[in-house]
Image (spheres, rainbow, N blue to C red):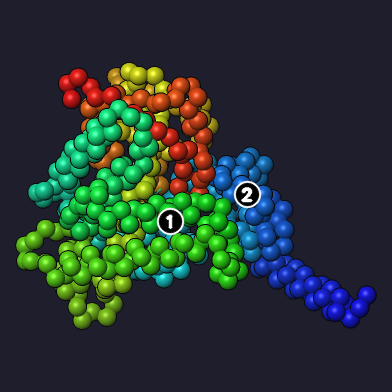
Amino acid sequence: MDITACGVTLAALMLTVLLLLFSWKARLRHSRLPPGPPALPFLGNTLQIDKRAPDQSLIKMSKKYGSVFTVWLGPRPAVVLCGFETVKEALVTRADNFGARGTVPSISKITNGYGIASSNGRRSLQLRSFAITALRNFGKERPTLEDFIQQEAKCLVDVFRRTKELPFDPTFQLTCATANIMCAVVFGNRFEYTDSKLLTLLDMITENMRVISSPWGQLYDLLPSILDYFPGPHNRLFENAAKIKGFLREMIQSHKEARTAGGPQDFTASFLSKMEEEKGDPRSEFNDENLLLSTFNLFLAGTDTTSSTMRWGILLFLKFPEGMIVIPVLASVLYDSSCWESPETFSPDRFLDEKGRLKEIEAFMPFSAGNRMCIGEKVAQMQLFLFLTALLQSFTLRSPMDPHAIDISPLSSGFSTLHRPYQLYCVPRKSA
Ligand code: HEM
């Protein structure tokens, strides 16, 4: 062996020893964590987790290791809680211990700890309680939230009608509608579906949801300090986030300039009033950075979630027989077989009592539970109900392919569960 080869072998050996030492020390530091699947040094359990369906991999592991176990996400350990009882115990019964937001490297890099969804402690308490009140108040005055959604539902029916019974993918139209509702909530206005500002914003939100839910997004969150130095689709997340922030900054600035006393109290207007009220208080969290990142959180948390739930809903309408009872509950359900009979089966009846009324089911928590549960639940439910009923009253939705052949297994899941691309065509109802 020549001297260069010797050097390389020695360096590789030293690096391996260092990595082993590093991960052994990390394991020792966390030796009181619950047991879990055996993990490789440095890579942890990364290779055992299916990047396209991480939730399914964790559910599978829980069958062997119980409802509480540890997985190593690269060099970081995480305790996994599975099943309704365990999740409820943590998020609801012990809400104070489990209310903090864990660090997601990609999100931290974008938000730097500012904004409703990405902050913790005093900041999160102030912003969250402010946002809940602002959303509630926005819904009360004229034009109410319901007025905005009804108006948007008419536009949605119009664009669906213009497809003239030809097959199309509804993603774009549904995302325009939900983004417009977020615009109404945050800025008090809407955009035409052809407006270039709206189109650019949607492109960026949609791409970011796709990247963050993709194997690349997950890999970034496992090994951020390494991937920061590599090119790849994960970098699009940060480029897009910078552009979304630019758009929001512009919107906030024009809001500041156009604001009048007694004007509409959308989220931004309420936040600006609060900033003025608390001007001079050094402990106040009502500042420009928290306003920017909170509007960012609302757009990201409220647009694709609601649009994607409606797309899943429509896909199920296409696949299953007509005459099915339409209920506004279309979001994902937990798959806990001790709470649900045949959790994998599509069965909307499970949500109804013997008189056909909607049942309260504790285990149905698509908006999560506890201290960090979704603050947009009512906004989302109103949209799901009004948008979907407006479409179903106006059209019979049909699939260009045989409903039996429609594949409703997810394309991938991560931050969001993505459906496979599909098309539908809309046959106008006689009375519409
Ligand atoms: C069907 C639609 C929606 C679903 C399924 C959904 C689901 C969720 C879930 C599960 C969480 C908790 C995440 C966690 O525990 O980390 C959450 C948080 C959040 N959601 Fe929603 N959401 C929806 C629509 C909305 C809408 C329309 C808005 C805005 C009006 C919104 C704003 C937020 C915010 C700001 C948070 C973060 C709360 C915090 O960190 O304290 N969501 N959402």
- Residue 86 shown left or right of residue 73 in the figure: left
- Whether residue 313 can be seen here: no
Q: Earlier in the sequence, mark 2 or mark 1?
A: 2
- Residue 37 shown left or right of residue 97 in the figure: right
Q: Residue at x 25, y 61 (%)?
A: 130
Residue 309 location, x and y as percent? 37, 40
SS at badge 1? helix
**Residue toward you, 44 or 86:** 44
* Tag 2 near tag 1, CB within 8 Å: no
Vertical placement of 381 versus 34: above or below?
above
Q: Residues within 10 Å of mark 1 (few under 14, many from 20)?
A: many
Q: CA distance from mark 2 to mark 1?
A: 22 Å
* Quadrant housing the C terminus: top left
Residue hosting label 1: 208
* Quadrant housing the N terminus: bottom right
For badge 1, the amino acid type reads: Asn
Vertical placement of 340 versus 187: above or below?
above
Residue 254 location, x and y as percent? 18, 68
For badge 2, the amino acid type reads: Ile
User: Depth-wise, is mark 2 or mark 1 nearer the camera?
Assistant: 1
Task: Indicate if the residue with disc 1 has its beta carbon within 8 Å of ligand 1.
Answer: no
Residue 159 location, x and y as percent? 24, 38
Question: Most extreme residue toward the right, as rendered?
Answer: 1
